[in-house]
Amino acid sequence: SDSEREYYFPGGVEDTVAIELKYFADAIRSGGKPEVDAVEGMRSEAICMAVYESGWFGRPVTIEEIENCELEGYQKEINDKLGIGN
């Protein structure tokens, strides 16, 4: 429907990052809760990083290991090249 299209693509915008930023700004303006909060976003990223680190270390890596910054193999190479990290 037109209302669904406007909800998912406000103003005809189809750039997903722009849409997420709009939803976030709307939540700030209205005092509402964003669709995905910081904790949920961090947890989602930790899941992705656990997959990368698991491949790097050749063993299962837990989400908790990532969230607690207990290991860094795959990401360390990137951080070193960028001059960031510990």
Image (cartoon, grey):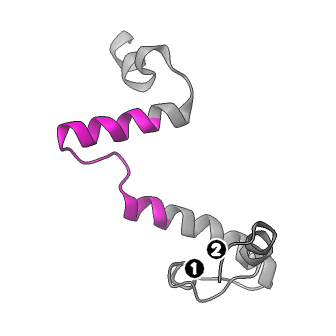
Q: Secondary structure at mark 1?
A: helix
Q: Which residues are magenta?
A: 20-43
Residue 71 versus residue 28: which sits nearer the camera?
A: 28
Q: Residue at x 34, y 45 (%)?
A: 35
Residue type, mark 1 in image: Ile
Crowd band around label 1 with a 10 angstrom C-alpha radius: few (<14), some (14–19), many (20+)? some
Residue 64, image x, y percentages: 51, 83
Quadrant (top left, top right, bottom left, bottom right) of the N terminus: top left
Mark 2 near mark 1, Cβ–Cβ under 8 Å? yes
Question: Residue 76 lies in what quarter of the image?
Answer: bottom right
Q: Residue at x 57, y 68 (%)?
A: 47
Looking at the image, the residue that sits furthest to the bottom is 70
Residue 83 versus residue 25: which sits nearer the camera?
A: 83
Residue 33, image x, y percentages: 25, 48
**How many numbered discs?**
2
Residue type, mark 2 in image: Ala
